[in-house]
Image: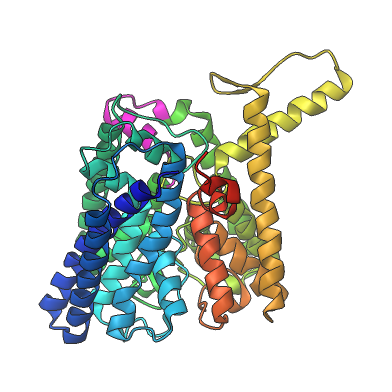
Amino acid sequence: MNLRIVIHYLGILVLVIGATMLVPLGWSLYYGETTARCAFMGAIAVSAIVGGGAFVLTRRSGQEVFRKEALAIVGLGWLVTASIGALPYLFAGTFTSPADAYFEAMSGFTTTGSTVLTDIEGSDRSILFWRSLTHWLGGMGIIVLFIAVLPFLGAGGKHLFRTEAPGPVPEGLRPRIRDTAALLWKIYIAMTVVETVALMVCGISLFEALCHTFGTLATGGFSTHSESIHYFDSVAVELIIIVFMILAGTSFSLHFRVWRGDWRAYRRDPECRAYLGVLAVATLVVTVTLWRSDLYEGLGTALRYGLFQVVSIATTTGYCTADFNQWPTLAKLILVMLMFVGASAGSTGGGFKVIRWLTLVKSARLQLERVFRPRTVRRVRIGSAILDNELLAANITFLGIGLGLFVLASFVMAGLGLDLVTAVTSVAATLNNIGPGLEGVGAVENYALIAWPGKLLLSLCMVMGRLELYSILVLFVPAFWRSQ
């Protein structure tokens, strides 16, 4: 492990995050928000001093990044990024507690959308823009942005990309990994422009259109209103956000293929078919459940709220148009199950990913068949790919570790005095990067009631979920830090 290289790149990362604060600084100037302006200027100055100092002091460390260095840069990078991202909240007085500020920043960058901000409408608009911008930066990945803008990473960029990219099978769209990173960001920016324009056509201001577009495409969920999307009470706005949430939860490699003219890419991909199938079945069951419960007048209204909430939770966005904490038990249970299913690999969505559950189902079916056909020699297939035993074992191991961490963290949260449902769903919502849970952390509530140790634990859950567990867990293994 070459710690000088790790510190060198962490310094550059801090400088990049500081530079992104120039955008909300511009909004603070536009709106005449003096306190926020000083907060961003102070945060930028700290970023320049810390990042610049780390960069200069380690500039002779070399640039070769191997696997261990890549894991350290990504794991520590996200922890450091949240620390720098928390500075504007502290300097502006939005939060007085460092734990609250860190929670909010980590929730933003990991696109979780859980919040401890109790007075959203009373906050400076530039601060709200920073919350949403952290979503957008973290959605495609701050390390992917890092790779796209830095020409000198070389082979190290591939290690960084594979370490951060969401899903079990990161796929390069171009021979050079820097080209892949740049291409992903181009697609991301193009979708951002289209959704922003579409929302503005519906009568939403540029500021709010940008903030909600950032939250949609990053599958984040921060809103400029405490009522979330319900504030707009517009079917057109909800439909636009639904469409882009579904697109954000789909693998970006499929978007690339469609962009290149392969219009059947979505239909041919087994994970995409399963992903859309889960959305369709869950929407049907939730809609019928709501309709029969007489919570809403008519099947159309039940479909409106059921569809939006299913897509929002399944894609791990977390936007709300209804207080689903008041829904029938069956509907709430489906939403909790969707938290663990998540979106597609290679998307901006969180959760355990559809491809992992699809692999588990196919593997289980094959094992059942071997009970009465012991000589069966068929292999597990996902589309045209044949999965070997090592991949199947890795899939089961990941799911086992993820569920184990969920149980362990739930015990800790319950030990902090939370009721069962609040404790369990707070972990489920943060580990899977959803945002809202049930009961005390439900759709119309927030995470302010949780004690600071719980907020730090949930912040750790957020980053583990965003980085697919391993990039954070290895930081706690002593052997990882040894030179050999």
Q: Residue at x 68, y 24 (%)?
A: 389
Q: Quadrant of residue 35?
A: bottom left
Q: Is residue 325 left or right of residue 219?
A: right
Q: Is residue 94 magenta?
A: no
Measuring from the top left, give residue 207's x and y in whole percent.
Answer: 21, 68
Image x and y of residue 76, in percent: 43, 56
Q: Which residue is found at the position 60% from the left and 79% from the top?
A: 440
Q: Is residue 249 above or below residue 35?
A: above
Q: Is residue 57 left or right of residue 458?
A: left
- Write the start and end of the magenta stretch as one range: 249-265
Query: Along the line of sight, which residue is nearer the eye, 273 or 100?
Result: 100
Query: Based on the displayed image, in which of its 4 quarters is residue 355 positioned?
Result: top right
Residue 342, can we see it? no
Front in this rendered view, residue 213 or 359: 359
Q: Position of residue 230 (x, y in %)?
A: 41, 72
Q: How many marks?
A: 0
Q: Is residue 478 left or right of residue 204?
A: right
